Amino acid sequence: MGGFGSGRKFGADCTDDYRSIDIRRWQREGLLTAGQQFNTEWWRRGEKVAAIAVKVETGQLRLIYSYRRNGGEWESLDYPVKLQTTTCHYGGVRYWFTCPAAGCSRRVAMLYLGGKFFACRHCYKLAYRCQRETIDDRSARRADKIRDTLGWEPGILNGNGWKPKGMHWRTFERLRAEHDKHAGLFMASTMSRFKIKIDR
Ligand SMILES: [Zn+2]
């Protein structure tokens, strides 16, 4: 039995914590004709942090990149991802990836890099709901997750509860500080949205 503070995780990771590729964007940009080759890059704080090459073939595309784990040897990867099409209401086709993970083959618009290979969010067990959340949605969710960890009543407005029995004080203080930070962000954001002002 793990118990509180033993590293047990509540909920899944967010899709937007991972590098992703979106076939809808590639289709919009006209990149999906056989014979095309292009690069896709990821940037953070003005710096390129990763890139892959994509080669479009008939009925599939190839993802070409190098991968290494924790500063180990670089490994060259080059594997096909089958494409699928569905017809649109107003004519034309819509493209989909077929998840390349063994035994999956789901038809998806996005693939994520959560390890060596791209795979769908089901394979990486990612929570889609994290996408496009506003700051207050996210703060409320993070605060609620901590409330859940601590066994406090759900909902920031219910105030803070007590330290769960058996949890180290250090762990509790860390979680409480994190909770208060997210609760504060949520309150600030909500109040600015509703034009509420607190006079001190
Ligand atoms: Zn999959």
Image: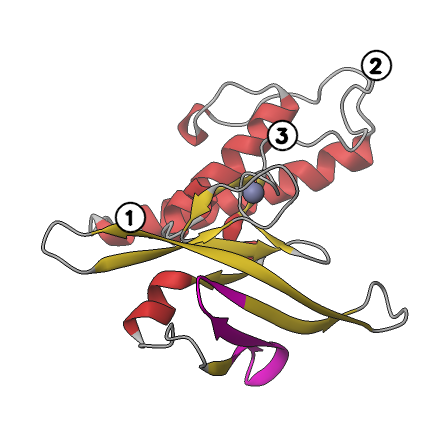
Element at label 3: loop
Residue assigned mark 3: 10
| Residue 200 seen in the current view | no
Q: Amino acid at mark 3?
A: Phe
Q: Are marks 1 and 2 in contact (CB under 8 Å)?
A: no
Q: Are marks 2 and 3 in contact (CB under 8 Å)?
A: no
In the image, ligand 1 is in what quadrant?
Answer: top right
The vertical placement of 184 against 17, above or below, is above
In the displayed structure image, the side of residue 28 where residue 110 appears, left or right: right
How crowded is the residue under tag 3: few (<14 C-alpha within 10 Å), some, or many (20+)? few
**Quarter of the rendering containing residue 117:** bottom right
The residue range painted magenta reads: 39-61
Residue assigned mark 2: 1
How crowded is the residue under tag 1: few (<14 C-alpha within 10 Å), some, or many (20+)? few
Q: Nearer the viewer, mark 3 or mark 1?
A: 3
- Label 3, label 1: how many angstroms apart (C-alpha)? 28 Å
Position of the N terminus by quadrant: top right
Asked if residue 172 lies in the magenta stretch, the reply is: no
